[in-house]
Image (tube, grey):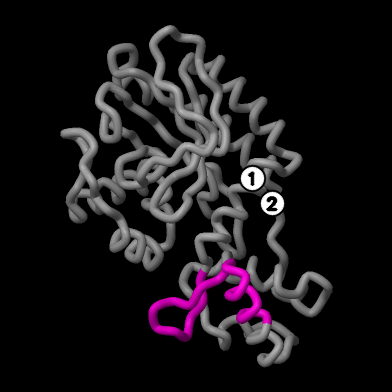
Amino acid sequence: MHFVAMDDLAGGLKPIALLERVAAMEHPVTLAELAVGSDVPRPTLHRWLNALTAAGLLQRAPDGRRFELAPRASQLAFSILSNQPGAALRHGLLEKVVRTVGESCNLTVLHGTEVTYIDRVEAMWPLRITFQRGSRVPAHCSASGKLFLALMPPAKRDRMLRDLSYEGFTENTITDRDALLAELAAVRKQRYALDREEYLSGLVCLAVPVIQRIGRSPACIAALAMQAPVSRLSCDAMIEKLPALQDAAQAMSGTLE
């Protein structure tokens, strides 16, 4: 997945490059900020922003002056990741890591306050819990979701935390904002996240980030995770599989260039 430089706004890509510019920013952006480094006149940038907003790809932040990605942009990103040429290669890498760790694995992206499965490969165990491509799980009680929250820019994380439902699904679900913040701080430091039976009783999960450089800094654009019944694999035993997941995530990041 290639992100267009701001200089390309003056070329043929126009509003699409502007959309990518907004996606690369760590906070909702103003017209003045977008104009920096661009030879495009402000009235033209304003017209493109209005067009992208009308198309449902951008939305105005609560202050009315700044722009950020709208939910439809997340759906577009989901479709691109699912169908671009690298999807077959990523599926092959997913199959390989399943053979290595011996458990079901999935690839997810963040969609609003939920994570969406864009691919999944099941391990051949008689006891397993099946999720289909397109399944969604709340971010606050999933390993992948906590990983996305921990690694996103602080301002965006604060807005997401205000939007979360904090619904309790099991006795292990983190339903308190301060407790979730403490968990996210640990995830940010260790660069992996666990679901300790927080969404489904009896199911544990380990997730690692798939990183791509967006603009000037690396970003977690997808998460690679493995799941297993706790009766077969404890969280401590699952962490022993961490190097294999991290190697696969690094290989997957190369399919997004």
Residue 113 position (above or below residue 241): below
Frontmost of labels 1 and 2 is 1
Q: Give the residue type that dot 2 points to.
A: Met
Q: Say which element carries label 2.
A: loop
Find disc 1 in the rendering and name its residue.
81
Where residue 104 sits: x, y (%)? 48, 21
Q: Are there few (<14), some (14-19), or many (20+) residues within 10 Å of tag 2? A: some
Q: Residue at x 46, y 32 (%)?
A: 225
Magenta stretch holds residue 22: no
239 relative position to 73: left or right: left
Marker disc for residue 1:
2
Magenta stretch holds residue 56: yes
Q: Give the residue type that dot 1 points to.
A: Leu
Where residue 219 sits: x, y (%)? 53, 54
Q: Residue at x 41, y 25 (%)?
A: 227
Magenta segment:
48-68
Q: Residue at x 72, y 65 (%)?
A: 4
Q: Where, by quadrant of the figure, is residue 210 drawn?
A: top right
Q: 32 or 75, which lies in front? A: 75
